[in-house]
Image (tube, rainbow, N blue to C red):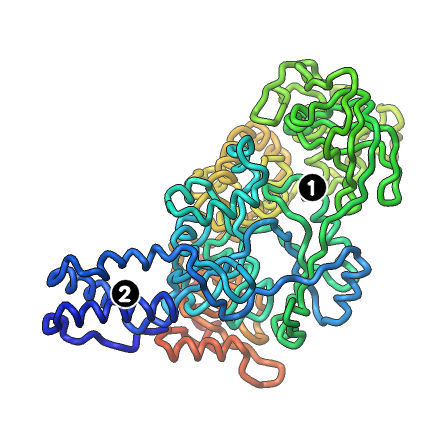
Amino acid sequence: MIPTESLPELDALSAGALEALVRRHNRLYWEDQAPVISDYDYDRLVLALRRVAPDAAVLLELGEREERLGEPVQHRVPMLSLDKCYSADEAEDWARKLEGDFIVMPKLDGLACSLRYDARGRLMLAATRGTGTVGDDITRNVRHVADIPQQLPMGDVEVRGELFMRLSVFERFKDRFSNPRNLAAGAIKQKDAQRSASYGLSFAAYDLIGTPLETEEQKFAWLVAQGFAQMELRLARHGGLGEAYGWFAEQRPHLDYETDGVVFRANLVREQQRAGATAHHPRFAIAFKFQGESGRTTLEDVEWSVSRTGAITPVALVAPVQLSGASIARASLHHAGYVRKLGLSRGCSVLLTRRGGVIPHVEQVVAPGDVPVLPPDACPSCGGAVRWDGDFLSCAQPGSCRAARLGELEHYCTSVEVLGFGEKVLAAAYDAGLLQSPADLYGLTVEALSGLERLGEKSAINLVAQLQEKRSLPLPVFLRALGVPELGRHVAQLLADQYGTLERIRGVTVEELASLHSVGEVIARSVVEGLRERTALIDALLAHVSVAAGEAREQGGPLSGKSFVFTGRMASMDRKQAQAAVRALGADTPAGVSASLTHLVLGEEKDGAESSKLKSARKHNGKGAQIELLDEAAFVALLRSVSPAPN
């Protein structure tokens, strides 16, 4: 609420009157969530009471503004449960009742939480889901969760999400607690806020209430732009829900949090409103729970493989067992530390689960075997030394390890989309001394390749021709192809958009990169150090490859500090071109209209009616925002006025 009252002359009030006022405004703030004075006026009121009655009882109670931990909170909109399905066919049957595509997100195994932001965008209240209609106040402790913004540019909104503990954080507590979820639930309710903060909880937003945004995609883009964590998301169409589920099932062992399924949600907000909800669950969302058939079998051996980064990964070789309609003879063991944790031995009886009906995993040892399985004390590929980093084992010298080098070569070929360089061809070229690093690919000749076993002249000509076509690479593709840990598709595109050229990216610091939304210090450090370690490789590749510049936002450009949103169709350019034009001049292009927006560009609407974005802008301007409305002609004129003159 915007403050609607002014305080009386405080110096003229008695101690009793001041105390009564403090109690009234405490109640309005905490119990009614409807403050009628500003924080500044509230602080003046408390200061006036302290001067005349420092021992007033209410002053001892003022901590309640931050000490209401556990007090009941009535949810404005019920936090409903989700309906569930257990097969792709069930999911598609549900989806047929809805129009449009679907946002797909992991169903985190954590603690549901509601965050309310007041009219000025300040975090005012945080509560657990509780019964769905009434939760517990956890505001004091939520303020110490690092990835929950305390201030948003848009007011009167509610963010819902999951409080959880990352598995990497849980490693510190696993000897004392059974699982991350229970620990997270206990940590957020600690009476000591500093102790609560010491558990390092995280927050993943999954819904945004109270905005004019029209799709879930727009909501998530806005949330990430405001500082909420970037989570794994997929967009699926009718007929593709099973594939999206399978993708998350495959990613599950590599995620840094526990998840027990995925959530499908109608992407169009208007479709959500049309579908409505029952008393128990919304009709526009459903949870597809991970499950898998389990079975007992015998561990015959453990195979150790070496990845392109040098990581040494175990795979269980088991007596074939039927699970979910398939014969399973190999199963995941995650990492070397997991082998130690299970206490594996050859001949032991193990329980396997085909999680999500896709990936077989060794879950536990049912009965011991005879010979303990020990992690290798030498690299299984090159025979060199190994090193431990927590639970992870790797080759100490991946630069001279055959398996790691072949992995690096295969990753480069896959990233730049050179077809035909499979594992066997690369191995033959490597063993023949033709290849050591990706840069050597561009020196291959038809004569040299055709001399390899099982590779004829026609195939050699095709491979060399493909390499010639890949002598010019888009900047994001080149970055991904380097094989730097954490430098995947998303971060590569982010770097290209932000910095524009490889030269600028190679000079970026950890601090600069960490300041970008959805990156953070861990990813930033990995990327910066990884690029530095690959200096020789990058220089060698640049002798053969040109890297096309990306679209960079000009630092301190003529539109720096401005933001543009577009609605309707323009005749002179499409929306992507318009967004690229203003970004190149330093402006931002947020997903939707908010009070902090500076410009809304109005194209032609199909039916001639006002768009929801225009209505939202008018609403914000009515409350004091200063969003400038530009038609296409005015927008083009603005671009011309600030664009650099051609040489």
Q: Residue at x 72, y 59 (%)?
A: 84
Look at mark 1 in the image and give the residue it sits on: 416
Q: Residue at x 57, y 32 (%)?
A: 538
Q: Position of residue 47 (x, y in %)?
A: 17, 61
Q: Position of residue 416 (x, y in %)?
A: 69, 41
First-in-chain label (1 vs 2): 2
Label 1: how many Cα within 10 Å (few below 14, some 14–19, many 20+):
some
Look at mark 2 in the image and give the residue it sits on: 39
Quarter of the image where one finds residue 460: top right
Quadrant placement of the N terminus: bottom left
Label 2 amino acid? Asp
Residue sitting nearer the eye, 407 or 579: 407
Establish if 478 lies above or below 348. below
Q: Residue at x 78, y 63 (%)?
A: 92
Establish if 352 lies above or below 369. below
* Residue 549 - label: none
Q: Nearer the viewer, mark 1 or mark 2?
A: 2
